[in-house]
């Protein structure tokens, strides 16, 4: 069978559809983060903006309530980065990336420490309840451990950010607790090969079709490990215009290339702009240095026009102020202005 060739425009529309950016969906926050394979939320309000752009009638309190009730969890998962995920996804995702994350840490931090022992100490500190990150670090320092062990602790102890830390009202409050205290583990436990397959399937449902290299980048795995997972799965296969192989889960949406893509606003570090989604060309390469730059501590919020980043935005003095990368057509500028006004109202609801 001749494999179908997917154009860059078709891949763009496929990712936008799966990321709920072609049409706002009638879903709960929990359902939404499952659909999009988690929301990257180093800066917690970006998760709120991300859901506002994806869900019909979304209000800030809806996500805050979901976080407080444990229906949405914030934790280090893929790429050693804080994500909002559902409780059902938390344990499989964590299990799927745990070993790769530890191996990365050992390569990046060549220090002689007994991480299992340090992890046991941290677990004892948190046995009675959550603790501020600063206090955990203070106790580690007092015990004679270098500050560099803190990133490692996150990989040897399953920690979750405990709300109201990490909500719209307290975005910079870092309070962490043991995941086992608040996130129910699946029965039976999902481990090993099954966990990795679930993560790949989730990624493809949210970002596919994709190459093995894309999946490896998202998961933080080696390309060899990624191909081993793909070999066990029943997947659809396509070709990119450049000739590379793409894989996908069956019956996932593949909208036509001419499907309209409305104006949408994204927060900092939105995963659609990262390297693993480059094939979708949501962030044109000529604009990448204006969104991710060494002199910028975090990525800048962006807005999409016809499925691609067309400029940046910031909320200031009660307004969402947009800075297009190039002049917009009058009708497009009007659409951006309307959406910006709605986003400004969302900030003060």
Image (tube, helix red, strand yellow):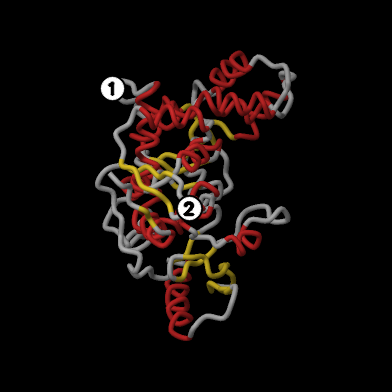
User: Which image quadrant for residue 94?
Assistant: top left
Of the image marks 2 and 1, the number of the one nearer the N terminus? 1
* Residue 66 rendering spot, x and y as whole percentages: 36, 46
* Residue at 49% in and 47% down: 40
Q: Helix or strand or loop: what does disc 2 sit on?
A: loop
The residue beneath circle 2 is 242
In the image, residue 8 sits, relative to residue 165, either above or below, namely below
In the image, residue 339 sits, relative to residue 194, either above or below, namely below
In the image, residue 236 sits, relative to residue 335, either above or below, namely above
Disc 1 residue crowd, few under 14, some 14–19, many 20+, Cα 10 Å: few
* Residue at 45% in and 49% down: 243
The answer to which of 219 and 180 lies nearer the viewer is 219
User: Which image quadrant for residue 199?
Assistant: top left
* Residue at 65% in and 14% down: 114
Which of discs 2 and 1 lies nearer the camera? The answer is 2
The residue beneath circle 1 is 187
Left/right placement of residue 3 relative to residue 289 reads left
């Amino acid at each position: 069978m001749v494999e179908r060739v997917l154009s860059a425009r078709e891949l763009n529309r496929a990712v936008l559809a799966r990321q709920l950016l072609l049409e706002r969906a009638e879903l709960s926050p929990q359902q939404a983060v499952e659909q999009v394979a988690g929301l990257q939320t180093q800066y917690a309000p970006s998760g709120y903006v991300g859901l506002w752009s994806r869900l019909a009638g979304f209000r800030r309190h809806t996500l805050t309530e979901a976080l407080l009730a444990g229906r949405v969890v914030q934790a280090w998962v893929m790429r050693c980065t804080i994500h909002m995920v559902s409780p059902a996804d938390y344990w499989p995702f964590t299990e799927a990336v745990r070993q790769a994350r530890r191996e990365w840490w050992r390569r990046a931090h060549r220090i002689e420490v007994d991480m299992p022992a340090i992890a046991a100490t941290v677990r004892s500190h948190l046995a009675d309840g959550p603790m501020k990150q600063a206090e955990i670090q203070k106790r580690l320092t007092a015990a004679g451990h270098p500050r560099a062990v803190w990133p490692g602790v996150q990989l040897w102890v399953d920690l979750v950010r405990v709300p109201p830390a990490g909500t719209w009202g307290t975005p910079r409050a870092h309070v962490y607790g043991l995941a086992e205290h608040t996130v129910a583990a699946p029965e039976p436990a999902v481990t090993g090969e099954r966990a990795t397959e679930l993560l790949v399937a989730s990624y493809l449902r949210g970002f596919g079709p994709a190459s093995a290299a894309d999946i490896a980048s998202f998961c933080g795995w080696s390309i060899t490990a990624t191909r081993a997972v793909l070999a066990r799965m029943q997947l659809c296969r396509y070709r990119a215009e450049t000739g590379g192989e793409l894989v996908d889960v069956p019956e996932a949406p593949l909208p036509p290339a001419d499907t309209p893509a409305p104006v949408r606003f994204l927060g900092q570090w939105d995963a659609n702009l990262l390297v693993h989604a480059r094939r979708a060309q949501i962030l044109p390469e000529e604009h990448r240095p204006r969104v991710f730059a060494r002199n910028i501590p975090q990525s800048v919020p962006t807005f999409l026009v016809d499925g691609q980043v067309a400029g940046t935005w910031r909320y200031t003095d009660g307004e969402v102020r947009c800075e297009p990368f190039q002049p917009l057509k009058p009708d497009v500028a009007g659409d951006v202005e309307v959406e910006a006004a709605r986003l400004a109202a969302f900030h003060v609801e």
